[in-house]
Image (cartoon, rainbow, N blue to C red):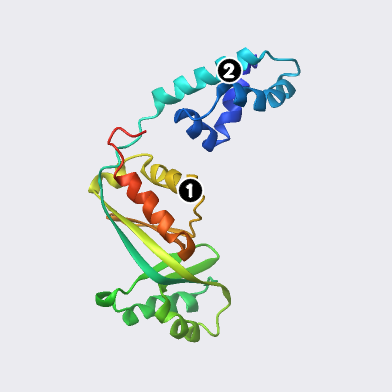
Amino acid sequence: MVTVSHVVKNILDKHVFLQEAINQGIVSYNKLADNIKPEIESELGKKVKHNAIVMALRRYNENLEKKQHRPQLNYFREILLKTDICYIIVEESMASLDIFQNFYKNINFKHGGFYNIVHGNYEIGMITNKRYKDTLLKELSDEKIANVVDDLVVISLTHSEDFLFTPGVIYNVLRFVAWENINILSIILTPEELSLVVTRVDAMKCYNTLEKMINAPKNHK
C-alpha cells in the first residue's frame, strides 16, 4: 500500500537540493508540506492531512541523518589557481587525437603550462593555456571544431591519498559550488588533485567557496 511517507520519499529522492536544505535545517517543514501537498494528493488520489506530510518529512530527515556519513574535508591541503585557460573541443577522430597527443611537447610546464585531454565517445577536448590556442587551432584546421571556450580558470584542490577511496567526496565538494550557482565546465581528477574548470566570471566566487569549505569545522555536515 502506498502511503504518505512513500510518496514524500519519492519526491525528495528526486530533489537533491531539497534533501540538502532539509538536512541543513534551513527548510520549514510546514511550508514544504504546503508546497508538495498537491503532488501527494494527486499521487494518492485522496485528500491528505497537512500534519501527516510534516511527520513524513521529519521521519525522512531522521533516516537521512542516520545513513549520511559525510567524509571529513580536512584532507584538502591547498587550492591552486591557473588563469587564461581555453577549452577546445573537436569531433572525435584519430587525426585529432594524434594532434592533441603530439602537442604535449609544446607545453612549457615549468612556466605554468597546463595540458589535459578529455576523450569522450564522440568528441575530444583539450584544456590548455590560452597562449597555445592559435597554434593548436592551426594544427586542427582540417578537423571539425565543435567549440572553443576562452577566459576559463582551473581551480585545483590537492588532497590526501585516501581521497579516491572515500565515498561522497566529489559530491561534498560540488554541493558547495552548486549552492553558489557556479557552473562547472569540466572536472579533472587525478590521484592527487581535483580540478574544476570554471569561467573567469565565476573564478573568485568558486575559489572563495572552496576556501570556506576546506576551512570549515571538521564536524561540518
Q: Quadrant of the N terminus?
A: top right
**Is any atom of residue 119 visible in this view?**
no
Label of residue 117 in the image: none
Q: CA distance from mark 1 to mark 2?
A: 28 Å
Tag 2: amino acid? Val
Label 1 Cα neighbours within 10 Å, binned few <14 / some 14-19 / many ≥20: few
Q: Which residue is mark 2?
A: 54
Q: Quadrant of residue 117?
A: bottom left
Where is residue 167 shown, x and y percent of the image?
A: 36, 39
Between residues 93 and 42, which one lies in front from this camera angle? 42
Q: Quadrant of residue 216?
A: top left
User: Which mark is first along the chain, 2 or 1?
Assistant: 2
In the rendered image, the vertical position of residue 6 relative to residue 14, given as above or below: above
Q: Disc 1 vs disc 2: Cβ atoms closer than 8 Å?
A: no
Q: Quadrant of the C terminus?
A: top left
Where is residue 20 shown, x and y percent of the image?
A: 48, 34
Where is residue 155 shown, x and y percent of the image?
A: 37, 60
Left or right position of 108 against 18: left
Tag 1: amino acid? Glu
**Is any atom of residue 144 visible in this view?**
yes
Q: Which residue is mark 1?
A: 180
Secondary element at tag 1: loop
Label 2 Cα neighbours within 10 Å, binned few <14 / some 14-19 / many ≥20: many
Residue occupying the point 72% across, 25% down: 38
In the rendered image, the vertical position of residue 58 relative to residue 178, given as above or below: above
Residue occupying the point 40% across, 22% down: 66
In the rendered image, the vertical position of residue 10 relative to residue 105, given as above or below: above
Residue occupying the point 47% across, 85% down: 139
Where is residue 40 shown, x and y percent of the image?
A: 68, 23
Secondary element at tag 2: helix
